[in-house]
Image (spheres, rainbow, N blue to C red):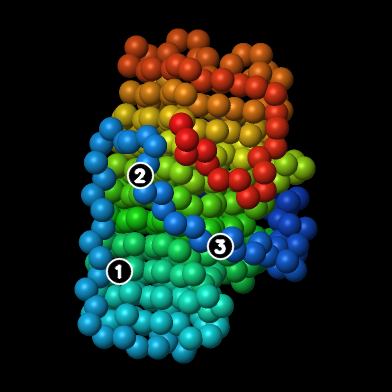
């Protein structure tokens, strides 16, 4: 049985992380050693498109920017606890820098580095910008509102994985690139994330999330690239998502939505190696209300191009997507052909052609 379809049999979050342990036993040691030896280099940040080619059918509230009146340099890891301050990183900070006050901005210039950026407490109006590099962005305290993360590279720091005697330490510090919990009004734009497992993980009931014009790579193929649970009003648009390597034998889906989620829109994205799973296989209750998947391009190596739960997804529009598949079954049977789709689903104008690899630095096709 292929690795992707094993997802159908993982019925709770504990099982998901047990699976990470099992996969790590065969995949992680070699890949982790290679990652430590030569981690992915950040791609240059790009500017957001002036106008999106496909508009979402709902509105996501943009985060409010921080109001800052002071500027200071940050030369060692310490809490960002002065409201109204713009901090600029100087050099290499091999520790954790924590947002602990509202109206705070952290700038990581080119060549600068912060091992981990975290958010604690109920803070609001914060901003993290590059074009420097951080090892992880972790928001696990919940109650963050109004945050912007842009023009920064997140390259997983293997030290944050805390490998134990078993060879791997799972949730919550599972080599995530970006960890979001119970956040509201967050924009992630023009970022590059190269993560050992999840490039983005979100849970706890987040709302109003924008993920645009960015590049995400889950390098081990041991977990999904973007996985969000219990999210309301999410737009994922104009991104490149990659999972594993074309020559590898371990993959997970590039994009997964689970739990009680509503108003999720994915358009004009480029999916490399693996596909999509919506409203099934996530563990626990699956109710995804109103999902759109439009004008995406997929270069498929792994099995499972597109999976969607007929019981878990109440309304869906899947249209104008183009796949290039190595899997003969998908080329013969089409992009997505469920036996008895609900009447509230619209599936149209999706194609599957012979496989061709995505160029290494290709961007999503914004011409559609």
Instruction: State whether residue 21 appears in this view.
Output: no
Q: Which residue is mark 3?
A: 44
Q: Residue at x 31, y 36 (%)?
A: 56
Residue 63 pos. (x, y %): 26, 58
Q: The N terminus is located in which quarter?
A: top right
Nearest to the observer: residue 294 or residue 178: 294
Question: N-terminal of the two: label 1 or label 3?
Answer: 3
Nearest to the observer: residue 138 or residue 299: 299
Q: CA distance from mark 3 to mark 2?
A: 21 Å
Check contact, mark 3 vs mark 2: CB within 8 A.
Answer: no
Q: Is residue 208 above or below residue 331?
A: below
Q: Which residue is mark 1?
A: 126
Q: Which mark is residue 93?
A: none
Horizontal side of 90 relative to 361 (left or right) equals left
Q: Is residue 42 above or below residue 53?
A: below
Q: CA distance from mark 2 to mark 1?
A: 25 Å
Can you tell which quarter of the image residue 357 is in? Answer: top right
Q: Residue at x 64, y 28 (%)?
A: 324
Check contact, mark 2 vs mark 1: CB within 8 A.
Answer: no
SS category of the residue bearing label 1: strand
Q: Which mark is residue 51?
A: 2
Please tell me how crowded label 3 is: few (under 14), some (14-19), or many (20+) other residues with Cα within 10 Å: some
């Amino acid at each position: 049985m292929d690795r992707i379809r094993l997802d159908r049999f993982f019925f709770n979050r504990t099982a998901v992380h047990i699976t990470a342990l099992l996969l790590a036993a065969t995949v992680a040691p070699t890949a982790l050693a290679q990652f430590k030896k030569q981690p992915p280099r950040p791609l240059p940040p790009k500017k957001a498109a002036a106008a999106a080619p496909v508009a979402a059918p709902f509105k996501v509230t943009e985060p409010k920017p921080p109001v800052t009146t002071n500027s200071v340099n940050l030369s060692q890891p310490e809490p960002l606890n002065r409201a109204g301050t713009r901090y600029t990183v100087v050099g290499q900070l091999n520790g954790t820098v924590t947002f602990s006050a509202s109206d705070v901005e952290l700038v990581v210039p080119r060549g600068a580095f912060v091992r981990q950026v975290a958010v604690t407490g109920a803070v609001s109006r914060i901003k993290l910008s590059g074009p420097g590099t951080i090892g992880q962005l972790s928001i696990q305290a919940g109650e963050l509102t109004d945050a912007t993360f842009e023009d920064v590279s997140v390259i997983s720091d293997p030290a944050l994985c805390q490998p134990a005697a078993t060879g791997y330490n799972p949730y919550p510090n599972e080599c995530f690139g970006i960890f979001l919990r119970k956040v509201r009004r967050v924009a992630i734009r023009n970022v590059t994330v190269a993560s050992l497992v999840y490039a983005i993980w979100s849970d706890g009931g987040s709302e109003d999330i924008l993920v645009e014009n960015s590049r995400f790579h889950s390098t081990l193929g041991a977990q999904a690239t973007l996985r969000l649970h219990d999210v309301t009003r999410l737009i994922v648009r104009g991104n490149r998502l990659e999972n594993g390597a074309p020559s590898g034998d371990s993959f997970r889906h590039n994009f997964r939505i689970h739990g009680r989620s509503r108003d999720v829109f994915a358009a004009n994205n480029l999916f490399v190696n693996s596909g999509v799973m919506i409203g099934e296989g996530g563990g626990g209750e699956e109710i995804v209300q109103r999902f759109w998947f439009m004008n995406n391009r997929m270069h498929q190596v792994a099995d499972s191009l597109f999976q969607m739960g007929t019981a878990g997804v109440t309304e869906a529009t899947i249209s104008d997507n183009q796949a290039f598949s190595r899997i003969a079954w998908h080329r013969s049977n089409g992009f997505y052909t469920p036996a008895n789709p609900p009447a509230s689903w619209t599936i149209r104008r999706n194609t599957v052609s012979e496989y061709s690899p995505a160029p290494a630095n290709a961007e999503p096709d914004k011409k559609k």
